[in-house]
Amino acid sequence: MDIKRITVFCGATSGRLPKFEEAAYKLGKDIAEAGYELVYGGGSAGMMGAVANGTVDAGGKVIGVIPRFLVEREMAHEKVQTLEVVQTMHERKARMDELGDATITLPGGAGTLEEFFEMYTWGQIGLHQKPLGLINTNNYFDDLMAMFDKMISEEFLEERYMNQLFIGEDLESLVAQFENFKPLPVRTYKDLQKGHRS
């Protein structure tokens, strides 16, 4: 698939271990060096600041999308080339999805997971047809993958919807998997009535 921009979801904190922020910076750097553009949440702190700094320091292009209330709190990154200011958190997510050709999520807290799950759900119901990647620094997402297995075994999630989700340690490992991504056909209500679960 043709990927030009990569949307990265991450938060304004850095986590307990230095390796988390280091992984964010490396991802940003790798995105620039691979010739992609970075789309991210526009902030200057924590994992957001690190991924943007990685791309900027490597000479890459960054598009930040940030709600106005965070700009007013002086949380916007001053070095990114393009900063789009929106009104709400939901508009931010929608715009970040619109701008990117693939999505990668870094380790983070409740807000980061909320962003990831909205992107996953949007893919499941056919609102986008893009691959989703997780950077599994320090095995951070192992328990999340176990939860997906639980959802499948309890028949709350069809295993077919795991085709959009990939997990790796860095950009290179994820992009290699993205190449094999094939979007599923969009399901209809009649499909569900035939006994399929979504």
Image (cartoon, rainbow, N blue to C red):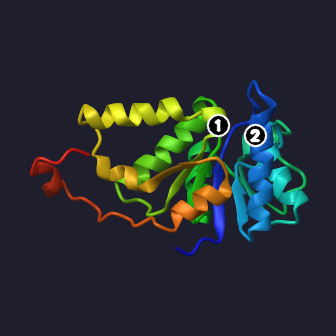
Q: Amino acid at mark 1?
A: Pro
Residue 32's mark? none
Which residue is painted at 30% across and 52% down in the image?
A: 160
Q: Position of residue 65 (x, y in %)?
A: 70, 53
Q: Is residue 116 left or right of residue 195?
A: right
Where disc 1 sits, the SS reads loop
Q: Mark 1 = which residue? A: 107
Q: Residues within 10 Å of mark 2 (few under 14, many from 20)?
A: many
Q: Amino acid at mark 2?
A: Met
Marker count (numbered): 2
- Could you tell me if the residues under marks 1 and 2 are in contact, i.e. CB atoms within 8 Å? yes
Please determine whether, in this image, residue 193 is positioned above or below residue 188: above
Please determine whether, in this image, residue 90 is positioned above or below residue 79: above
The mark that comes first in sequence, 1 or 2, is 2
Q: Mark 2 = which residue? A: 47
Pick out the residue farthest to the bottom. Answer: 2
Where disc 2 sits, the SS reads helix
